[in-house]
Each structure stands twice: as structure tokens, then as C-alpha cells.
Amino acid sequence: MRFYLFSILLFLLSSCAQSEKSEEFLQPAFQKYTEEQERIIEEYSKQCANRHFYTFEMNGYQECLDRGLEKDSTISYLWQQKAMPYFKARKYEVGMPFLDKAVKYNRRKYLAYRGFIKCIFSKRYVEAIEDFEAAIEMDGNSYEMDHTYKFYIALSYLQLNEFEKAEKLFAEDIRDQESKFEDGAHFLDLFYYGITKYELGKWEEAVEQFDKALETYPTFAEVLLYKGICLARLDREEEAEAAVRLAKEEGDKGNTFNEDNAIYEMYPYQFKWKKHNH
């Protein structure tokens, strides 16, 4: 019976399980483990914790990791694995002390990850900025979850209503990406850069950035929506109406934020479309 129930749950939540798998089997890149520590990870994480579907079997999942940490409490990967499902369950204060432990034992690997969690999950924006600024000092403007450290700092400033700071950082980050990549900047950078312009009342400049984002992701509903709002501010009523109508159509189709973690958290300025809510 338990196996049958587990199989049904896996089927129903297959999209979530696939997204989680990459994190569950992620190995830290910077902390070098001894042979004994690798054995502990194999036994208590891969062979024990990962046999429990933590969405419904959190206690069993956590007990496996606890047994591993009893063997060696300095293994940062086990601490991160304890923290991760609590954030996905929106139990931020439960998960954060475990993630702090991961950072303690492997700062280089998990500091930026903690900044990401604070920015996207727990909304502790001042602390997110601090983590990413410290990460930049260690590794430069590197990447976490497909975006640069500067992206998350700028997004945090945007959420703190410090729009000028956000505008400056998004502009810098976009220039850096355009100088390095043939395809230019990530469309989400362009969207949020446009949002900073929108918040500052720079309607034409906002539309310009939204159009750039639409070149890469032409059906991105939120971009179309905010573009329509800006066009209305510019008294371009027919264009505004067309953009908003198209935004609703695309939003109802699910053409919204395609970030992996958008299944767990609403991203800033994400809209709850009628037929497609996370």
C-alpha cells in the first residue's frame, strides 16, 4: 500500500519531483570531503534521505540526515539538504539555521545560495544584499541559479523601493552580459530593468527594455502586461489595450515566469493569472 501511494504521489507531482532531483543530488564544488565523509553522504543522503519523498515524508527524510550529521556534523552538504525542503514548504525560519550551518562549513559554496534563498524565498532583502556582496568579494560577479550576483542585489534593492540603486545595478549587469554573450542579457534582467524604469515613471525607457525582453521571450505575460500599463501612461491607448489583452491570453496559457523555483515562490512583480497559478 505504501509503495502504491508513493507511486501515485510521484506521478501527480512529477514536475516538482524532477525539479527537486537536481538539487538533491547536487554535490558541493568547493568543500573536499574525506573518503569517510563521502561514505556518510552516500549512506545517509542518497541511500536513506532520498528514498523519502520529503513533501509528504519530511520526518523520515530529516531523520536520515540527522543520523549522518551525528557521524560528522561538519558536512555542509547534509546541512544544506536539511534546509532545502523547509524553504520549499515556506517554513523559512525552520530552514535558515540549517543553511547557516552549511555556510559555516562551506562558505564559498553556500553563501550565494543563502543569498538567493533570502532574496527569492524568505524576502530578507537587506541580508540577501549582504550575502551577495560578500560573495562578489570572494568570486566576482558569478552566478547562482542562472543569474548573476548583481542581478539579485539589484532585485533586492528593487524590492526595498531603492529604485535608483536597482536601476544602476541592472544597467551594469546588462552591459556586462551584452559584452560577454552573443545572445545579450537574460530576458529577466531586461524585464526587471524595465520595471525599475516603470517605478521611476520613465515610461518610454521601460517600454524599450520590455521590447528587448520580448525579443527573447515574446509570450512573457508579465512583460506584456507592464508594457501595456506604460503604453497607457503614454496615451497610446490602442497599443496598450492590445498588449494587456495579449498578456492575459499568454498568462492564462501559462507563459509566465519560467524560473525553476517559481513553482515554490511568486517572483517580484509576478501576476497571478486566473488559469495558471503556482
Image (cartoon, helix red, strand yellow):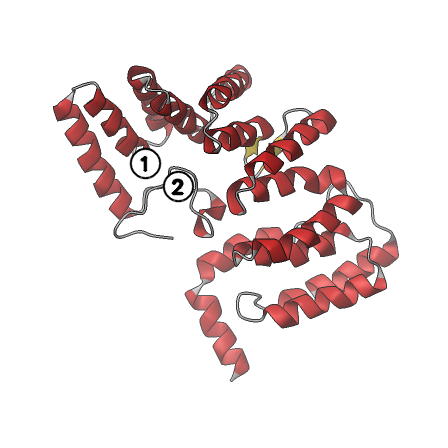
Give the amino acid at mark 2.
Answer: Phe
Residue 257 got which mark? 2
Q: Which residue is mark 1?
A: 222
Q: Earlier in the sequence, mark 1 or mark 2?
A: 1
Per the model, the C-alpha gap separating discs 1 and 2 is 8 Å
- Please rate how many residues cluster around mark 1, counting C-alpha atoms within 10 Å: few if below 14, some from 14 to 19, many from 20: many
Residue visible at 18% across and 36% down? 245
The reply to whether the C-beta atoms of the residues labelled 1 and 2 are less than 8 Å apart is yes
Residue 249 spot, x, y in % from top left: 21, 42
Quarter residue 192 falls in: top left
Q: In this image, 135 relative to 1: left or right?
A: right
Quarter residue 267 falls in: top left
Residue in front for this viewpoint, 175 or 182: 175
Q: In this image, 114 relative to 262: left or right?
A: right
Q: In this image, 249 relative to 4: left or right?
A: left
Give the amino acid at mark 1.
Answer: Glu
Quarter residue 82 falls in: bottom right
Does residue 210 show up?
yes
Residue 48 spot, x, y in % from top left: 69, 68
Residue visible at 81% across and 56% down? 38
Residue in front for this viewpoint, 147 or 12: 147
Residue in front for this viewpoint, 51 or 71: 71
Residue 173 spot, x, y in % from top left: 53, 21
